[in-house]
Image (cartoon, helix red, strand yellow):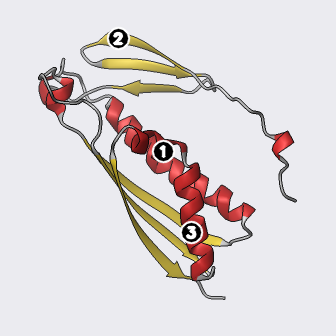
Amino acid sequence: MAMRMDDIPERRENWAEAEFKSGAKIVITLKSGHVLVSDEPAGFAGGAGGENAGPTPTGFLVAAFAADIPVILQRIAREQAISLQSIGARVSIVWNPRGIAGLDGVEPTPFEAVSDIRIRTNASDSEIDALKIAYERRCPLYNLLRKSGCRMIENWRVEKASP
C-alpha cells in the first residue's frame, strides 16, 4: 500500500548535543538516546590531538552519507516496486585540512564526494535509471553536499539478479 503525503509530516527535527571532554574527545548524545564518541588520532592534521577513541567529525559525516544511501535507495525501490536483493555503498569525501586550520582563502568544506554504490536487482535498465534519478533528488546528505558546492561522483555497479 502506497503511503499518502498526508501521512508524512511536513517537518521533522533531529538533534545532537556534544560535550567536550579532553584533547579532541567529544561525547555526543542524540535525540534517540544513542551516545557517540568523536575523537582524533594524536597529532591529527595539526589538531588538538586525541586518543583515537572514535571517528573524527568528518568520519561521522562520511559514515552518515554511506548509511543514508542504502536507506534511501531501499525506500525508493519499495515505492517503485523494485526488488533490490542487496545494496551497499562506500563513500569518501575530500577536503583541505588547511581550511580547518584557518589558512586564508581555503574553504574548510568538502570539495569532492565519491560514492561507490552497489545493487543487485532484476529491475530493467529504465527502472534502474528512475531509481538513480529519484535517489539524486531525494537523498538528504547527497543534496546537502551537492548544494554546498561539493563535486559529487557516483560510481554505480549494478549486478543483475537471477529471476
Q: CA distance from mark 2 to mark 3?
A: 40 Å
Badge 2 or badge 1: first in the primary sequence: 2
Residue 16 shown left or right of residue 98 in the figure = right
- The x and y percentages for residue 103 are 12, 23
Q: Is residue 31 above or below residue 121?
A: above
Query: Disc 3 residue type?
Result: Ser
- The x and y percentages for residue 42 are 16, 26
Badge 1 or badge 3: first in the primary sequence: 3
Q: Is residue 118 above or below residue 124?
A: above
Q: CA distance from mark 2 to mark 1?
A: 32 Å
Q: Nearer the viewer, residue 121 or 79?
A: 79
Please name the residue shown 74% across and 61% down the image.
79
Please name the residue shown 62% across and 70% down the image.
84
Residue identifier under label 2? 21
Residue identifier under label 3? 86
Badge nearest the viewer, 2 or 3? 3
Badge 2 or badge 3: first in the primary sequence: 2
Q: Nearer the viewer, residue 136 or 81?
A: 136
Indicate the quadrant where residue 98 lies.
top left
Q: Are marks 2 and 3 in contact (CB under 8 Å)?
A: no
Query: Disc 2 residue type?
Result: Lys
Q: CA distance from mark 1 to mark 3?
A: 23 Å
Badge nearest the viewer, 2 or 1? 1
Q: Are marks 1 and 3 in contact (CB under 8 Å)?
A: no
Q: Residues within 10 Å of mark 3 (few under 14, many from 20)?
A: few
Badge nearest the viewer, 1 or 3? 1
Residue 86 shown left or right of residue 52 in the figure = right
Say what secondary structure mark 2 lies in.
Answer: strand
Residue 83 shown left or right of residue 141 in the figure = right
Tag shown at residue 143 = 1
Q: Residues within 10 Å of mark 1 (few under 14, many from 20)?
A: some
